[in-house]
Image: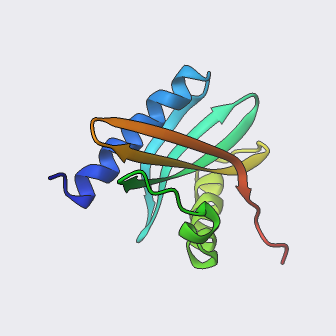
Amino acid sequence: MINTCESGRRAEQFAARFLLAKGYRIRHTNWRCGKKELDLITYYQKELVIVEVKSRTGGVHHNLGEVVDQRKQRNIIFATEAYIRLFNLNYPTRFDIISVIYNGHTADIQHIENAFFPMAG
């Protein structure tokens, strides 16, 4: 049986390979800002794309909007702002979610582009 930490790492590796095959460039993985973490930081077509990776087992498909709740979204946005300031970036930025669903020996990947947007304020 695979543990949750290992499952998450494998899901991030699947997601990174999936994105690379689609022409994304990986800039950083598991980048931390205090206790907040960005799973994958990528570039694609002149955009900075922040990707949150979620893994599930047993073929259960969840509503990803519920899996990445508002609190998690705020943490991702906060860490992204810190990342942009640290590296002095000036790119349009979007937030995607990739879900890796393990079905026995296979994995299905669901990629949702523009999964959420920063709140004005």
| Quarter of image, res 12 | top left
The residue at the point 14 percent across, 53 percent down is 1
The spot of residue 106 in percent (x, y) is: 34, 34
Number of callouts: 0
Given residues 62 and 68, the one toward you in this image is 62
Horizontal arrangement in the rendering, residue 36 relative to residue 3 (left or right): right
The residue at the point 65 percent across, 61 percent down is 81
Horizontal arrangement in the rendering, residue 1 relative to residue 68 (left or right): left
Given residues 93 and 19, the one toward you in this image is 19
Horizontal arrangement in the rendering, residue 19 relative to residue 48 (left or right): left
Q: Residue furthest right?
A: 120
The spot of residue 112 in percent (x, y) is: 66, 47
In this rendering, the answer to whether 4 lies above or below 6 is below
In this rendering, the answer to whether 29 lies above or below 82 is above
Given residues 111 and 118, the one toward you in this image is 111
| Quarter of image, res 89 | top right
The spot of residue 101 in percent (x, y) is: 43, 47
The residue at the point 60 percent across, 63 percent down is 63
Horizontal arrangement in the rendering, residue 98 relative to residue 47 (left or right): left
In this rendering, the answer to whether 49 lies above or below 46 is below
The residue at the point 41 percent across, 71 percent down is 35
Given residues 52 and 78, the one toward you in this image is 52
